Image: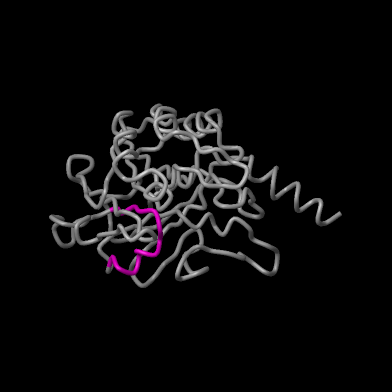
């Protein structure tokens, strides 16, 4: 019976669900970011089981209803899962077009995007639908109150933090986002907050045992949630879709909603 319950939950109930997960993050040395509300959509994996166009529309509706100031898409829009059928990138981007936030909607690329689609096609599909893709580059937000830096994916060896942070004055408030959290140690405290995805929180988190497989060179250290490392802060979203195997247990799909204090 336990095996049956695990199978029902892991292969159906959890991966088919969706929630908005709230996290408050205290950033004492970045007053320009205080009060900012950010929605993070990561690891959509369009075409994976339970991630069809209707599900993407639900993600858009739930995100907009939360009324974030800024929406960040943290990579891996492409699907690669047993039992799934990848959605065309143009279709995924078209269904994300409805995302709305006063400070904009921005995206970075993930390892699956580079491997399955290529940076060019993904960026063109998103840009055609009003979503700005940052590939190792930055943009001033809210009249220059702070800078948003989009760092390309470290897992597929496309991350270039120096290029992404180029031209930003020392000590200026910077919000960074990327796909793989493994680039975090290379940022040398330049970012008031770094936001990432990629890990899916391991997809399976067993009682007592914990997370079985975390796709990071640092294993469970950057698996999920809020991580403090010295004066630097990292948040890792567990994301929405599944990768390789269509299973989630103890790690429900989420849109991460961050409020900076």
Please provide percent x and percent y for residue 248: 63, 51
Which quarter shows the N terminus?
bottom right
Which residue corresponds to the image point at 34% horizontal and 69% vertical from the top-left? 185
Look at the image and tell me whether residue 103 can be seen: no
Q: Is residue 62 above or below residue 205?
A: above
Residue placed at 55% from the left, 32% from the top?
52
Is residue 181 rendered magenta in the image?
Answer: yes
Above or below residue 244? Residue 211 is: below
Q: Residue 21 appears at what percent x and percent y?
A: 53, 46
Residue drawn where x is 22% and y is 40% of the image: 142
Report the colour scheme: one colour
- Residue at the image position 50 percent from the left and 69 percent from the top: 219
Q: Position of residue 178 (x, y in %)?
A: 35, 53
The reply to whether residue 236 is visible in this rendering is yes
Start and end of the magenta stretch? 175-187
**Who is closer to the viewer here, 255 or 51?**
51
Query: Residue farthest to the right?
Result: 1
Picture quadrant where residue 143 is located: top left
Viewer-side residue, 126 vs 195 = 126
Task: Tell whether 207 sits left or right of 69.
Answer: right
């Amino acid at each position: 019976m336990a095996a049956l319950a695990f199978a029902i939950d892991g292969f159906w109930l959890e991966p088919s669900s969706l929630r908005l997960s709230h996290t408050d993050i205290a950033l004492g040395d970045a007053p320009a970011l205080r009060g900012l509300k950010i929605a993070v959509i990561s690891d959509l994996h369009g075409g994976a089981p339970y991630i069809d166009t209707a599900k993407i529309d639900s993600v858009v509706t739930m995100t907009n209803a939360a009324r974030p100031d800024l929406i960040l898409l943290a990579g891996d829009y492409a699907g690669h899962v047993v039992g799934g059928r990848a959605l065309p990138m143009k279709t995924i981007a078209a269904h994300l077009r409805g995302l709305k936030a006063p400070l904009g909607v921005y995206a970075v690329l993930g390892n699956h995007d580079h491997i399955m689609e290529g940076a060019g096609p993904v960026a063109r599909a998103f840009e055609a639908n009003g979503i700005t893709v940052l590939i190792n580059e930055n943009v001033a937000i809210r009249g220059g109150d702070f800078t948003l830096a989009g760092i390309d994916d470290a897992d597929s060896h496309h991350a270039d933090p120096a290029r992404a942070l180029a031209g930003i004055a020392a000590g200026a408030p910077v919000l960074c986002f990327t796909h793989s959290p493994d680039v975090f140690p290379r940022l040398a405290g330049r970012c008031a907050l770094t936001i990432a995805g990629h890990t899916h929180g391991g997809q399976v988190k067993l009682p007592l045992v914990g997370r079985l497989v975390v796709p990071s060179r640092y294993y469970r250290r950057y698996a999920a949630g809020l991580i403090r490392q010295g004066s630097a802060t990292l948040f890792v979203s567990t994301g929405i879709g599944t990768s390789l195997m269509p299973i989630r247990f103890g790690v429900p799909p989420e849109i991460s909603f961050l409020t900076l204090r």
